Image (cartoon, rainbow, N blue to C red):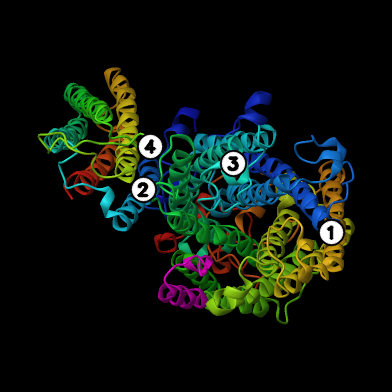
Amino acid sequence: MSTTTVAEPHAGHEEHHDLGFVRTYLFSTDHKMIARQFLFVSLFFLLVGGILAGMVRWQLGFPGQPMPFGNLLPDTMAPGGIILPEFYNSLVTMHATFMVFFALMPMLAGVFGNLLIPLQIGADDMAFPKLNMLSFWITPVAGAIMLASFFVEGGAAGAGWTSYAPLSTSGEWTGVYMGQILWLVSLIIVGFSSITGAVNYVSTVINMRAPGMTWFRIPLATWSLFITAWLLLLAVPILTGGLILLLFDQTIGTAFFRTAGSGEPLLWQHIFWFFGHPEVYILILPAMGMVSEVIACRSRKPIFGYHAMVLALAAIAFLGWIVWGHHMFQSGMNPMLGMTFMATTMVIAVPSAIKTFNWLGTLWKGDIHFDTPLLHGVSFVSLFIIGGLSGIFMAVAPVDIYFHDTYFIVAHLHYVLVGGSLFGLFCGITFWYPKMFGRMMHEGLGKIHWVLSFIFYNLTFFPMHNLGVQGMMRRIYDPNQYEFLQALQPMNTFISINMFIFASVQAIFVFNFLWSLKKGKEAGNNPWKSNTLEWTVPSPPPHGNFPQMPIVYRGPYEYSHPDAEEDYWPQDMPPVSDTGGQSVGAPTPETVPPESVLGD
Amino acid sequence: MSHAAIATMDRSPMPGMKVYNNKLGMWVFLLSEVMFFTSLIGSYVILRFAHPEHWTDPGVVLNVPLTALNTFFLICSSVTMVKAFAAIEAGNQKALQMWLLATIIIGASFVGIQVVEYIALGGEGFLPALDAYHAVGRGNPHGGPALGGPLYGATFYAMTGFHGAHVSLGVIALIFVYIKSLRGGYTKENHQGVEVIGLYWHFVDLVWIILFTIVYLI
């Protein structure tokens, strides 16, 4: 193929064509529209998960007291507004399930995988647009099944989001029969969404890059999403297999995990965590990638150690496969094996520390612009450090034996998943909102939302470390049933009040989000003066993204270069020597670089 | 540039691999399938090591000769699939149709024989459910007591059942490919569908060789 062919207009979306409402907004194959669909659906499920968390915190903060608006719930859940123990089990289970599978995963991989991958690598769309549409539409269907399980007899699944066997194999202990089956079916279905999405992301990144977009010119956000896609691709089918076997135990009476038929309950834990630990990195790596973009851009400095950042992502993803046993130190697993898992787990601190120091190195002496995305990004780094450090406590088997299944782990996982993933998502949403919707979010409201979220987030989750150290169990309905936990009630009430404030503060974000859709300042192509390809096209980008195939000449983080006219060099700007010292806009076919630039 | 010209423009890969998207996508998807079967096979290995008393010697409960014949069929269908691909590579549409039809027939026979096998085993009480399981060995001329345990039946049906479902889906997909081939939808230059379904078919065949070995022969 000659190089000139490549530079010709591609995608065939030049002419205007009106697809009509249904194909534009409902059954769209455009990756940007699918990203927006994922965003609204996952924000809805984030709200659902938040409401469930609020009910959990009500019970813990004010045990046995009628909940405000609680009388709206049926008597099988909360008679007179007082949460029943069985319903509480469903609440903790479904809170985690919605947050992990229907809020964070679709937001990280679904929204930003779809939005960023094609735009950042210079492609007109995903490799398989129809498969992409399918992967979106599976999600609300599965979510609806999950929601419906609240209203079947016996209520929603109550065996924890880990659904440990044998508790989950039969309703005789939890009282949940149909709810558990619907939980399994819903997760099997949503797994197909992850797998089809992952096939798309992997194929797109491998095959659809614009000329010149070599592996080490790919922006870190896309790198992280690419590596996440591999984790999804390889981890989710393991869970699907396990879920199907558990479904057989529930429905047709097999005994894979049931003790009654000499099945192996421990096998379920191995399957679940063999998926579950890569899942942890599925939930954090995309946030890391997005934060890397924002920190480099808003400090106006090249990312510190780009190659090290990529390799650290890959190392974390690889190590994530050989550490699952650290969730099972107390399961009766061979302690010798536990030591192995402990060692591999501690090794993950190395690539994590590389990333953290590189973020700090990027900020160091940078021209830092303290706007909302950066504030959320820096919060991500600091809260991830706290979550990472408490993770080391859990990684050490002798310490974990004490902390296991206490509020210490609840604090740890919320520092990683809320402090990490959710603040990373706020960072990503506020940064790419202009690209998605063409308008800026309100900066003042954004800062108020950030500072209040940061304060009340910490007031909510930091004291949970103390609860855990003092022995309060995870998932407990009423800790006051134990005398030694009664003294913790004031702290539980304190946490609950702060959680309610933290949740209410999110209304500012929602308001800002909706208000800015119509009233926000026009964003223009490149409001953040960023280098990556998505900022070279209009906001929101037209169907087909690029008016002509972009050609990539440089890496993504060339900020504050002394030779640059402004302080940044977009990836598609040809080398200065080629254009006689002038920086030019989009390259023309005549400026196609020599073959050497195009190499893989 | 006209719309038609753009649509057929080679959008493939400058820095990417020298493989078209559909083929790459199928390879990536098959990796995911490998992990799915790994979860089933891994569970089988763990359960069997933990509870060897649930299993019998090879051939006592399961009908090895019949399944060996079936395995032979499935391997033959991979050969016919290769023949179909070779035919269209050479631009021979008639041969493509013939070999595709052969693949469909053999693949469907495989599923059919598996169903016959299931019915026979189920009739003997070799069932996945804990309460219903009471297999009687065919290796024992006098019938004899129940052999093995419910984990044997459960893992057997889970693994071979999901494999059978994959073969069935493959047959359905092959029927679509066959219909398209009857309409002359594949040419010497453009026959991605044949190659991609071929990849899937060989994968399913490969999985079966592993399953046959560990389920029937060991």
Question: Local crowd at mark 3 within 10 Å, few (<14), some, or many (≥20)?
Answer: many
Instruction: Tell me the element at label 1.
Output: helix
Query: Relative to B51, is A153 on the left or the right?
Result: right
Viewer-side label of 2, 3: 2
- What type is the residue that disc 4 sits on? Ala
The answer for how far apart the CA atoms under marks 4 and 2 are is 17 Å
Instruction: Tell me the element at label 2.
Output: helix
Q: What residue is shown with label 4?
A: B129
Viewer-side label of 3, 4: 4
Chain name for mark 2: B
Residue A274 drawn in magenta:
no
Question: Local crowd at mark 2 within 10 Å, few (<14), some, or many (≥20)?
Answer: many
The answer for how far apart the CA atoms under marks 3 and 4 are is 45 Å
Q: Which mark is residue A587?
A: none
The answer for how far apart the CA atoms under marks 2 and 3 are is 34 Å
Of the pair A305 and A588, the residue shown nearer to us: A305
Q: Position of residue B202 (x, y in %)?
A: 25, 40
- What type is the residue that disc 3 sits on? His
Residue in the picture at 69% in, 63% down: A414
- What type is the residue that disc 1 sits on? Gly
Q: Quadrant of residue A355?
A: bottom right
Q: Position of residue A439 (x, y in %)?
A: 79, 47
Viewer-side label of 1, 3: 1
Q: What residue is shown with label 1?
A: A61
Residue in the picture at 59% in, 65% down: A556
Of labels 4 and 2, earlier in sequence is: 2
Give the magenta range.
Answer: A325-347
Q: Are marks 3 and 4 in contact (CB under 8 Å)?
A: no
Q: What residue is shown with label 2?
A: B40
Of the pair A93 and A76, the residue shown nearer to us: A76
Chain name for mark 1: A
Viewer-side label of 1, 2: 1
